[in-house]
Amino acid sequence: MAAKKLTVTLRRSLIGEKPKTRATVRGLGLRKLNQTVQHEDTDTIRGMLHRVKHLVEVVESKK
């Protein structure tokens, strides 16, 4: 069974965000606006995405 992938795109600026939020975005591998990265669908990644849900766009793919 193939694991799901999550495509994460940074849609909003980090200006004015708290240091913990900035660190979470960096931990996801995002540095610039509209940058996109892919991650495995794990509980850890889901938790990070929940923390920054107001800044990112997430799309699920089954690849």
Image (spheres, grey):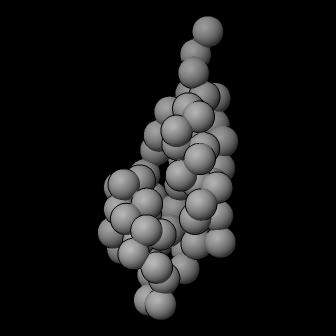
The residue lying at 59 percent from left, 34 percent from top is: 43
Count all numbered tags in the image, as a single digit. 0
Left/right placement of residue 12 relative to residue 20 reads right
Q: In this view, does 33 lie above or below 62?
A: below
Q: Is residue 26 visible?
A: yes
Residue at the spot 64% in from the left edge and 64% down from the top edge: 53
Residue 35, visible in the rendered structure: no
* The one of 34 and 28 positioned closer to us in this rendering: 28
Above or below: residue 23 compared with residue 46: below
Using the image as rendered, state which of residue 14 and residue 2 is in the foreground. Answer: 14
Residue 1 shown left or right of residue 15 in the figure: right
Q: In which quarter of the image is residue 1?
A: top right
Please state the horizontal and vertical placement of residue 46, each as a whole percent of the image: 60, 44
- Residue 45, image x, y percentages: 52, 42
Residue sitting at x 46%, y 79%: 18
Residue 28: x and y, percent? 41, 53
Image quadrant occupied by the C terminus: top right
Q: Residue furthest bottom?
A: 16
Where is residue 3 shown, x and y percent of the image?
A: 57, 21
Give the residue at x 37% y 65%: 23
